[in-house]
Image: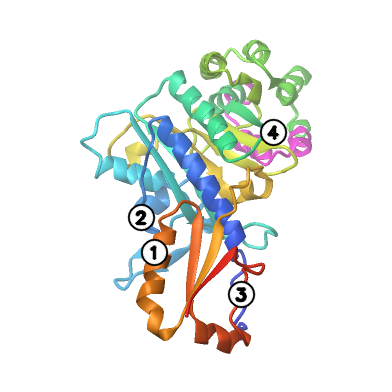
Amino acid sequence: MSKPKVFEKPPGVKDYLPETVAKLRRIETNVLECMQKWGYRQIVTPTLEYYDTVGVASSTSDRKLFKLLDKKGTTVVLRSEVTAPIARVVASLLKERPFPLRLSYHSNVFRAFEDEAGREAEFFQTGVELVGDSSADADAEVVALAIASLKAAGIREFKIALGHVGFLNGLFRESLPDRPDEQSALKDRLLQRDHVGYRNRLRQLGLAETVREELEGILRLRGGQEICEQARSLSRDRTAQEAIRHLCEVWEVLQAYGVSEHVLIDLTMVGDFTYYTGMTFEGYAADLGFPVCSGGRYDNLLGQFDRPAAATGFALKTNRILEVANMEEPEAPYRVLVLYAPGKVKEALAHAGELRRRANVIVETARIDAVASRNGAPPAGGGTEYDEVIEFA
């Protein structure tokens, strides 16, 4: 294996230059301030977690985890998402705090992708977890907050697709009884948004035409509140009916928030069946093929940390938002260079300190002889890099 060149970096990671970092920090700050106004308090969890606790509880598949061995030989992982670490904290450091708990976060996370062009191994997430409330109101709250957060991040045109894993679980159990492998295969096609593959798989199952048409019909279940009524007629399964009832309640609360115009019900939008237990959702910005946020209900996770509780939340994919955010540029700072001769150090640095106390002023300092040796002569008159140059000679 050849030695990497000094300027190379591992695949899937990137450098962020100052201008990009400034935009990223504005997005992060605006979103976290939005979340704080809704009562969510920020938490920070470690970059490293034990595999046998947080790693196995994570929604990330095992093959996508970065695993390491510590000096004792214990397997640890780089955090691949923040929900499982927060569940650990809720069940330990916050175990005496009453529910509901509203927590927010912003972190870099790590996932190992093999031969997947464009997928980043390190990226940023900003999100919330609402723990200890199983109501439709709680689900509606996190969806409404996701909408507010996308607006705070500078996303103007977007849609939230709202689904429920219980509907497809019930429908498939009723239509394909005792055929769990086929149910899983169909769910996987929907999870991958492979609707052609879903139809082809249905045709291979040898189903009665009415059953096949019914299962194909769910691909058309996208729209507003009318989808709830249409879905009720597709299955008499209790789980499916309960899922639709819950989604209808969520929709009504979203109408009360005044944000239902941003939401559509999509009963093929299922999320990870092994992790989510109820409502799921994804947010799509205009002209971007990947979701910029995702979330849902995961009522089984806290039980793995011995504090069973209902929970729901979402995460913004902050680095994807960088590509499409339309944020108002802040006022450019007034840049000052303070130059000083060796005998004027104290006077010059005191003046620089006074200038830095002013709003939106950036001050750099340098010795005159050092600047002259680098550039041939000290800058004068402001130039293009600085708005003002002050000399203490």
Where does label 3 land, which residue? 380
Magenta segment boundaries in residue numbering: 173-201
Where does label 2 land, which residue? 52
Contact flag, marks 4 and 2 (Cβ < 8 Å): no
Amino acid type, mark 2: Asp
Q: Earlier in the sequence, mark 3 or mark 2?
A: 2
Q: Earlier in the sequence, mark 1 or mark 2?
A: 2
Name the residue at 73% across, 39% down.
194
* Residue 386, disc: none
Amino acid type, mark 1: Gly
Q: Please, is residue 377 above or below residue 52 in the view?
A: below
Left or right of 307, for residue 365: right
C-alpha gap between disc 4 and disc 3: 46 Å
Looking at the rendering, which quadrant does residue 299 occupy?
top left
Residue 285 image offset from top left, x and y in percent: 68, 38
Secondary element type, mark 2: helix
C-alpha gap between disc 4 and disc 1: 43 Å
Secondary element type, mark 1: helix
- Which one is in front in this view, the residue at disc 4 or the one at disc 2? 4
Q: Please, is residue 81 above or below residue 102 in the view?
A: below
Residue 118 or residue 326, whichever sits in front: 326
* Residue 353, disc: 1
Q: Dot 3: few (<14), some (14–19), or many (≥20) neighbours within 10 Å?
A: few
Where does label 4 land, which residue? 157
Quadrant of the image containing the N terminus: bottom right
Q: Earlier in the sequence, mark 4 or mark 3?
A: 4
